[in-house]
Amino acid sequence: MKKKALIFGITGQDGSYLAELLISKNYTVYGVKRRNSLIQTTRIDHIFKDKHYKSDLVLKYGDVTDSLNVNNLINQIKPDEIYNLAAQSNVGISFEIPEYTAQVDAIGTLRILEAVKSLNMKKVKIYQASTSEMYGNSTDRPYNEKSRFQPVSPYGTAKLYAYWISKNYRDAYNIFISNGILFNHESPRRGENFISRKVVLGLIYVLKGERKCLYIGNLKSKRDWGHAVDYVYAQWLILQQKKPDDFVISTGQNYTVKDLINRVLIKLEIKHKWMKDLNGLEYVIALESKEYIKNKQIIVKQDPSYFRPNEVNNLLGDSTKARRILKWKPKTTFKKLIDEMVEKDLDKY
Ligand code: NAP
Ligand code: GDD
């Protein structure tokens, strides 16, 4: 019998890689897509185009803000594994739409748990996409499964509710649900308004003359950046355990946003220099002409409108537990990750 997996959030970065992984492991994958005015399945369309795979992927319309829909999907599909990746996942945007973020990221998880509880599905295993954002600016770095949580954004706070309600239902009703506390992970499929992809795409547009300058916010924050392909493998491993548990997934190395910009500039072979204006805002000038960039052109500039009302300054993970129990470790370095992102976007361009 083929295993059945149900992925909420299949059209996202992680959902698309996870679908590929599960199909390669002989699962039938059911994915939940939202109704949008334009079809938003570009990250998974290639799976349907491959005749070997297309019968292994079934898409259903749905939304984790709709209890009836969540209940019906779980009841009809009767999955062996549920991956709850559905989220309004942008931290900056969560300050602008905090209530919606809570509806999806916090109560969405509760809806899935209530469906599984009320349907009395004893065997299903659930993965909850928890996040390093829950640590906020807590001081006991590097963060592991025992570190304190102090979220500083509507997103982080909503995700902390989802984390705790998952543990509550695990203890109270014996539901198999595990939290993966994942640190930032990127890929060529990353959404365009996260910093890694924004910088890669933005600087390619500057190089090709489609844009004069890339505008960004905080340069000093540090992130522990890994590759999404390595991280979805950890998600699957977490559900292959005999008992539900919580795991930090991280590389153990972190870099500033400025490091990230420098890495992209190096990969694009753009000689450059950082400068500061009278207000202390930093900017980058090109040190020679290249393609559509002129010598001394300002190609990157800080714009305060991208600063967040609250910032998580320094995320660094300790994934010792995952390395020991899951035998998981990241395969991709920061340099390799950024280089791959630049190469893929240059190819597409
Ligand atoms: P993503 O690219 O933003 O994908 C989010 C997915 O959720 C998309 O498929 C999106 O659908 C779907 N979604 C949004 N609202 C929904 C709703 N109301 N009902 C059903 N589906 C909905 O995020 P990701 O980077 O793949 O991350 C996957 C999960 O891991 C998220 O829960 C995120 O919060 C969490 N996480 C991510 C990271 C990271 O660094 N990437 C780290 C830790 C935790 P549309 O395509 O229609 O928008
Ligand atoms: N998005 C964005 N856009 N971020 C910027 C910008 C900008 O123009 N300029 C500076 N930054 C800074 C942010 O302030 C933050 O400190 C850092 O770059 C990373 O921002 P994002 O790439 O948006 O990611 P994030 O760390 O806020 O959240 C991501 O990682 C979390 C795990 O730690 C998301 O994927 C979350 O869903 C995930 O839970």
Image (cartoon, grey):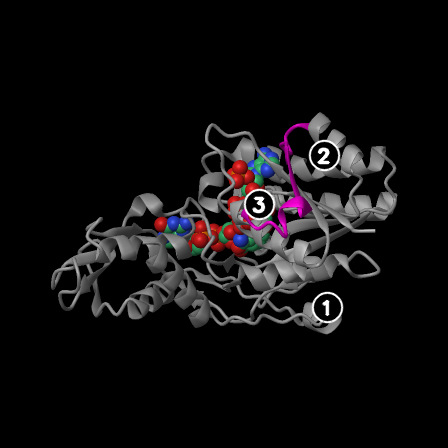
Residue type of the residue flagged with mark 2? Arg
Up/down of 62 relative to 178, above or below = above
Q: Circle 1 is placed at which residue position?
A: 326
The relative height of residue 43 versus residue 345 in the rendered view (above or below) is above
**Is label 3's Cβ within 8 Å of ligand 1?**
no
- The residue range painted magenta reads 49-66
Disc 3/disc 2 C-alpha distance (Å):
29 Å
Q: Residue 316, relative to residue 122: is it above or below?
A: below
Report if the beta carbon of the residue with label 1 is closer than 8 angstroms to ligand 1.
no
User: On residue 48, which mark appears?
Assistant: 3
x, y percentage for residue 177? 77, 50
Q: CA distance from mark 1 to mark 3?
A: 31 Å
Residue at position x 45%, y 71% in the image: 336
What residue is shown with label 2?
111
Element marked by disc 3: helix
Q: Earlier in the sequence, mark 1 or mark 3?
A: 3
Do the residues under discs 3 and 2 have CB atoms within 8 angstroms?
no
